[in-house]
Image: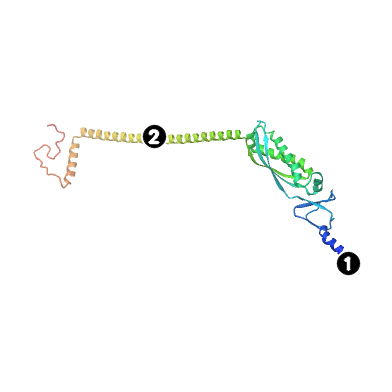
Amino acid sequence: MNARLGIIGVVVMVVLVFGGRFLKTIPPGHVGVATLFGKVQPKPFREGLQFPVNPFYQWVLFDVRQTTLKETAQVPTRDQLQTKIDISVQYRIDGERAPEILRETGDAQRLVSVQLTPFLRSLVREEGSKVQRAEDFFEEETRDRLETGLEVRMQEFLEPKGLIIQNVLIRDINLPTVLSQAIEQKKEREQAVERQKAELERFRQEQQQKVAYADARLQAAQAEAEQVRVLAKAKADEIRLINDAIAKNPAYIQLQSLEALKEMSKDPAAKLYFMDSNAAQPLPLMHIGEGR
């Protein structure tokens, strides 16, 4: 009886101590690689509950979700200038190759530091050396060509090693100080030229307005002078016609005198005129034009 109780106690202790080791939970977005006494097991374990598993397994987890590596590299161009470029590489670990990765390289952190980062730095310098001038990095075509070249070559080299490259992006470009200053000075000169052009355009428009105003005044003066000339000509013609009428008809002035006398009689302040019935011209003003 005592022996049986002892056996039962040993079994209970084994279950309590090792029971949890028959179970393994792999977190979401991860794969697990098991090793047994230093030997890597060939099959990766997917996320979720794994049961039963060898209680003597040692576990290494690999995060197979997409992640981003940010790197800054000094890139030489053919003009012998160094340009600092900030690059982002979006990648993920191939879960099916996780046992191979652990055996040949190590865990995920070592995979990035041994395979991804050194190759990226070397490749950026190599691709950058194909650029003629540092300022060409600001051209969209140059950036696209650099990103495409990096992405294709990194995929070819790293995917067999268990790294799936999804995107290579250039975040920022910092030109050498001497070139940045030269570009800034060039921009300042261009802005100064643009300001001068704007000032010249404003002056030209002002002069055009002045010319248009002067033309308008000249046309107005010419029109006014033409009006005066026409009125003067009309007045002269009127005087000439009157003189011709007087010369051809002496009674014309007498008729005008009678008309004037009628108008004068309508004025309340008109004076009295005494007419001499014995005179040759008894009406007032009728003697106008006669010689004394």
Residue hosting label 1: 5
Q: Nearer the viewer, residue 187 or 7?
A: 7
Tell me which amino acid carries mark 2. Ala
N-terminal label among 1 and 2: 1
- The answer to whether 199 is drawn above or below residue 108 in the figure is above
Residue 214, which numbered label?
2
Which quarter shows the C terminus? top left
Which quarter shows the N terminus? bottom right
Q: x, y percentage for residue 106? A: 79, 45
Q: CA distance from mark 1 to mark 2?
A: 126 Å
Q: Secondary structure at mark 2?
A: helix
Q: x, y percentage for residue 81? A: 65, 32
- Examine the rendering and report whether any part of residue 141 can be seen: no
Q: Secondary structure at mark 1?
A: helix
Tell me which amino acid carries mark 1. Leu
Q: x, y percentage for residue 76? A: 67, 34
Residue at the left extreme of this rendering: 278
- The answer to whether 175 is drawn above or below residue 53 in the figure is above
Residue 125 location, quadrant: top right
Residue 285, which numbered label?
none
Q: Nearer the viewer, residue 261 or 249?
A: 261
Judge left or right: residue 187 versus residue 110. Answer: left
Q: x, y percentage for residue 247? A: 21, 32
